[in-house]
Image (cartoon, grey):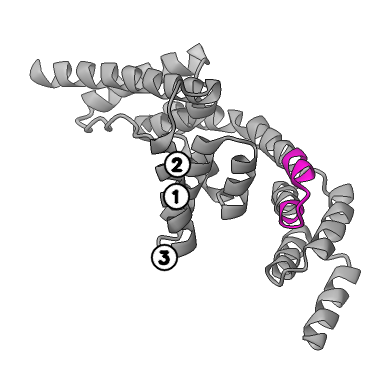
Amino acid sequence: MGKSDDLIGQILSHGPSQGTLFLVLRKIGQEGRYSEVIQECLKALDRYPDDIRLRILLAESYFEVGSVGQAEEELEKGISMIEDLISSYKLKANIYVREKRPEEAADALKLYLAHKPQDQEALDLLEQVRPVQADTGEVPEEPPSEKGDEDVSSELATPTLAEIYYNQGQIHETISTYERVLLDNPDDTASMERLSELKALINEEEGPRSKDIDQLRSKKEKMIEILERWRAKAQGLNHGK
C-alpha cells in the first residue's frame, strides 16, 4: 500500500496528461480516498476547466463525502458542457446526408433531438431522410421506447449519479439512471435491488405527477408521434410498389 501511494504521488507530482490524471484519481477514489480526489481534481480543473470526466469525478467525490450541494453544482457544470457539444450530432447528420448515408444521418438526428426536441430544422431534416430510407428498401426503425434518452448519457450513469438525483427529489430520473447502470452492468445486484425499491416506491405514490416528469413524458410522446408518421409514410410507399 505504501509503495502504491508513493507511485501515485510521483505520477501526480510530474504533471501527468489529462487522461493519465483521470485514471490515477479514479483509482484513488476506488480506494475511498475521496478528500484527496477532491483536492487533486480542483487543482487539475484550474488547468483543464473543460475536462468533463474530471468534473463528474469531482461531483461523485463530493457526494461520497456528503457535500451534496457542491456535488450538484459540479454536476450541473458537467451537464452544461455536454449540452454545448450536442450540436455536433446535427453537424454529423448533415455530413451523412451529403454522403448519402440516410440511416446514419437519422441516428445522429435522433440523438440530437433527444436534447433539442424543438429544433424545427432538425425535425424537418429527419423527415426528409426517412423517406429516403424507405426508397432504398431499408426497414424504418421502431419508435423509441421509454429509454429514448439513454444513449446520450449512459456513459455518465453511475449509482452515485442516481443517488444525487434521488436527493434532489427526482425519483424518475433516479430510476432511469439505475436502468442505464444495469444495461452496462447487469450483474450489479446492489443497483438491481435499489431499482426494485424505487419502482415499488413509485407504485405506492398517489396524486399528480411532478412537472419535470410531465415534460419528459410529453417530449417522448411527441417523438413517438413523429416517428409513427414516418413509419406510416414508409409503409404507404411500400404498398404502392
Q: Nearer the viewer, residue 62 or 3?
A: 62
Indicate the position of residue 47 as horizontal and vertical percent values.
Answer: 88, 50
Instruction: Determine the secondary structure under disc 3.
Output: loop
- Closest to the observer, 42 or 238: 42
- Camera-nearest residue between 134 and 221: 221
Q: Quadrant of residue 80?
A: top right
Q: From the image, tell me which residue sits under label 2.
A: 201
Amino acid type for the residue under numbered disc 1: Glu
Which kind of residue does numbered mark 3 sit on? Asp
Mark 2 falls on what kind of element?
helix
| Residue at the spot of label 3 | 187
Above or below — where is 156 with respect to 1? above
**Mark number displayed over residue 197:** 1
Which residue shows up at 16% across the image and 21% down it?
235
Q: Which residues are magenta?
A: 61-73
Q: Whole-Å distance between the Cαs marked 1 and 2?
A: 6 Å
Give above or below for 111 relative to 54: above
Mark 2: amino acid: Leu
Label 3 or label 1, whichever lies nearer to me, is 1
Category of crowding for the residue at label 1, using alpha-carbon neighbours closer than 10 angstroms: few (below 14), some (14–19), many (at least 20):
few
Q: What x and y, as percent, mark residue 118?
A: 52, 15
Q: Are marks 2 and 3 in contact (CB under 8 Å)?
A: no
Q: Is residue 182 above or below residue 115?
A: below
**Callouts 1 and 2 close, C-beta under 8 Å:** yes
